[in-house]
Image (tube, grey):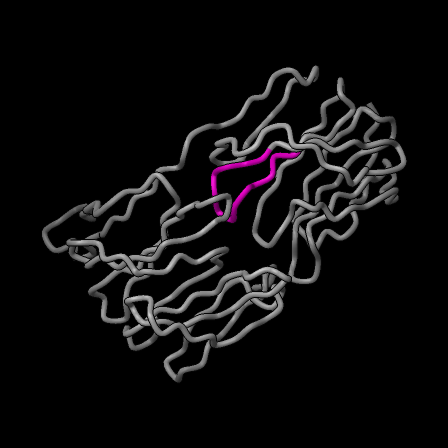
């Protein structure tokens, strides 16, 4: 069998290829970089772009996965409903030899896919997917090896939603961000727990589209970066009670996906897709 290399354009973005049953056509699903939005690209086997589309269901950080259904001549999309969440919407799009049609039909809403891995039978009648929430846990590890041959690990708490943590500058507390979906909108709930265990204290704010978070350098407050719609993001500072919110900066969504406060009261930010 002869092997024919197919050039893929714009390889600066992460991508995957979906084979079609339409002769001489394939779909290249391009991921987002700091300069580009996610795209679906209809290409021929020589790498020539026939059509391209920025899907209506994409937004910063949200994942989507595509599968071709030969019997239906449709592209099936598993689209992450909320940033960082485990719920996906199953969508379909019509594709012809000359175009990716922009209309999207919803097949199923709020399917618990966990990792987002999904496949479909060729006749379009059966769906296979990974199900259930992802359980995460917070543990401390004793790094003092005196008299020990192995590191000692102590589990503090667990969650059936995504859980992230940041240790305080003084090392005595841990700032947690726990996914808290509400009303179809992705939100994160902050809390603080003592490093050695104890009562978890809730911070009375729920942040939508959380990108990154950190302690303030003095440990008296917290900072977080989140999307606010209109292709904008905000960097916010607040005290550990959730009161006294202060906007540090409002930026284009391509300007930053991560940040780190500096001891001199400055902040470094890092755009997506860059190192």
Looking at the image, the residue that sits furthest to the bottom is: 264
The residue nearer to you, when weighing 124 against 271, is 124
Residue 88 counted in the magenta span: yes
Relative to 257, 122 lies left or right:
right
Q: Residue at x 43, y 65 (%)?
A: 224
The residue nearer to you, when weighing 203 against 124, is 203
Relative to 227, 73 lies left or right:
right
Is 118 situated above or below 159?
Answer: above
Count of marks placed on residues:
0
The residue nearer to you, when weighing 179 against 29, is 179
Looking at the image, the residue that sits furthest to the front is: 183
Is 114 situated above or below 85?
Answer: above
Q: Residue at x 18, y 47 (%)?
A: 152
Residue 35 place in picture, x, y as percent: 69, 62
Residue 20 counted in the magenta span: no
Residue 133 place in picture, x, y as percent: 40, 34
Instruction: Choose top left, top right, bottom left or bottom right for residue 189.
Output: bottom left
Q: Residue at x 27, y 42 (%)?
A: 158
Q: Residue at x 60, y 63 (%)?
A: 274
Is 255 situated above or below 94?
Answer: below
Relative to 218, 208 lies left or right:
right
Residue 132 place in picture, x, y as percent: 42, 30
Residue 252 place in picture, x, y as percent: 62, 68
Q: Quadrant of the C terminus?
A: bottom right
Q: Quadrant of the N terminus?
A: top right
- Give the magenta part as a residue range: 77-89
């Amino acid at each position: 069998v002869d092997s024919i290399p197919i050039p893929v354009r714009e390889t600066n973005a992460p991508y995957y290829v979906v084979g079609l049953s339409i002769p001489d056509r394939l779909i290249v699903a391009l991921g987002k970089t700091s300069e580009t939005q996610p795209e679906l690209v209809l290409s021929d086997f020589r790498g020539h772009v026939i059509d391209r589309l920025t899907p209506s269901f994409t937004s910063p950080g949200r994942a989507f996965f595509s599968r071709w259904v030969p019997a239906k001549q449709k592209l099936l999309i598993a689209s992450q409903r909320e940033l960082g969440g485990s719920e996906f919407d199953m969508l379909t799009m019509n594709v012809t030899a000359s175009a990716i049609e922009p209309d999207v039909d919803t097949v199923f809403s709020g399917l618990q896919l966990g990792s987002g891995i999904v496949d479909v039978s060729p006749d379009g009648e059966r769906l296979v997917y990974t199900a259930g929430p992802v359980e995460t846990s917070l543990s401390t590890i004793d790094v003092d090896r005196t008299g020990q041959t192995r590191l000692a690990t102590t589990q503090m708490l667990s969650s059936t939603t995504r859980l992230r943590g940041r240790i305080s500058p003084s090392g005595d507390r841990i700032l947690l961000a726990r996914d808290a979906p509400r009303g179809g909108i992705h939100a994160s709930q902050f809390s603080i727990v003592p490093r050695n265990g104890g009562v978890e204290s809730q911070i009375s704010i729920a942040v939508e589209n959380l990108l990154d978070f950190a302690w303030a350098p003095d440990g008296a407050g917290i900072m977080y970066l989140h999307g606010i719609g209109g292709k904008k993001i905000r960097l916010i500072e607040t005290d550990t009670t959730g009161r006294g919110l202060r906007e540090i900066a409002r930026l284009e969504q391509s300007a930053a996906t991560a940040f780190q406060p500096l001891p001199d009261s400055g902040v470094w930010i890092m755009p997506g897709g860059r190192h």
